[in-house]
């Protein structure tokens, strides 16, 4: 498993990189874990419902938030600075070839990451995919698997502007809230440390050799 940190990047630019890496992994190269923080953007998944956007596209644009349709699973979610977006471009055929197991494993990486930071996270299968702290989601998951190679991934809230989630019904959910590592820890997390914990969680579940981080 190779880890590549893209830093901060617009959603479309990161999508182009995902597609390039996807081709490489389909061709037999090693799994790649991409880290990125996006400029403010709402992404609309394959199960998007219009009523989950609480403003018009023009109003989002006025706030500096792009709105982009994608082919990942799920409804609408927010990405922005302070949120670690994790794209595991993995050959799922080498990790059980089971989409249900794949989703549970992705949840497990976030549960393990939170535990390593002193936060008890869990699943809420009766509500929505992801990792939760109490009744608040701390990590959202939405993927698309093409020819058994994954695209899209996980959004872990480190220290984003949580008020942005009030502009939508996150993942189509109106009965539960959203939280962050900062809110749960009481202070801003060290970003480099969070990335290290995430890489370790993926390594523990999926990799046979230590991850290599490339800037």
Image: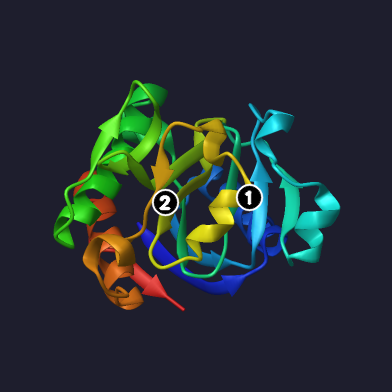
- Identify which residue, 39 or 32, lies in the foreground: 39
Is residue 5 in sight in this rendering?
Answer: yes
Q: Secondary structure at mark 1?
A: helix
**1 and 2 marks in contact (CB < 8 Å):** no
Residue 14 percent location from the top left of the image: 63, 61
Q: On the image, numbered disc 1 is attached to which residue?
A: 167
Residue occupying the point 35% across, 43% down = 136
Lower sequence index among marks 1 and 2:
2
58 relative to 175, above or below: below
Query: In which quadrant of the rendered view does residue 159 lie?
Result: bottom left
Q: Crowding near pointer 2: few (<14 within 10 Å), some, many (20+)?
A: many
Residue occupying the point 41% across, 36% down = 176
Residue 15 percent location from the top left of the image: 66, 55
Disc count in the image? 2
**Circle nearer the viewer, 1 or 2:** 1
- Identify which residue, 29 or 122, lies in the foreground: 122
- Per the rendering, the mark at residue 31 is 2
20 relative to 150, above or below: below
Distance from the alpha carbon under mark 1 to that under mark 2 = 35 Å
- Identify which residue, 187 or 43, lies in the foreground: 187
- Per the rendering, the mark at residue 214 is none
Q: Crowding near pointer 1: few (<14 within 10 Å), some, many (20+)?
A: some
162 relative to 76, above or below: below
Query: In which quadrant of the rendered view does residue 95 lie?
Result: top left
Image position of 205 (left or right of 172): left
Residue 24 percent location from the top left of the image: 56, 52
């Amino acid at each position: 498993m190779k880890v590549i940190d893209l830093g901060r990047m617009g959603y479309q630019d990161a999508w182009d990189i995902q597609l390039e890496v996807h081709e490489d992994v389909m061709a037999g190269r090693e799994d790649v874990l991409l880290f990125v923080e996006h400029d403010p953007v709402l992404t609309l998944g394959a199960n998007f419902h219009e009523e989950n956007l609480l403003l018009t596209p023009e109003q989002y644009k006025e706030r500096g938030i792009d709105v982009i349709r994608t082919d990942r699973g799920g409804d609408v979610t927010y990405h922005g600075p302070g949120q670690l977006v994790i794209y595991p471009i993995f050959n799922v055929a080498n990790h059980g070839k089971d989409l249900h197991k794949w989703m549970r494993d992705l949840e497990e990486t976030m549960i393990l990451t939170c535990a390593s930071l002193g936060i008890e996270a869990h699943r809420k299968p009766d509500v929505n995919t992801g990792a939760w702290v109490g009744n608040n989601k701390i990590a959202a998951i939405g993927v698309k698997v093409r020819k058994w190679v994954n695209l899209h991934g996980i959004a872990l809230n480190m220290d984003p502007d949580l008020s942005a989630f009030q502009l939508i019904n996150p993942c189509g959910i109106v009965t539960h809230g959203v939280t962050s590592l900062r809110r749960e820890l009481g202070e801003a997390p060290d970003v480099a440390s969070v990335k290290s914990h995430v890489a370790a969680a993926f390594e523990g579940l999926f990799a046979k050799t230590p991850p290599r981080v490339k800037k």
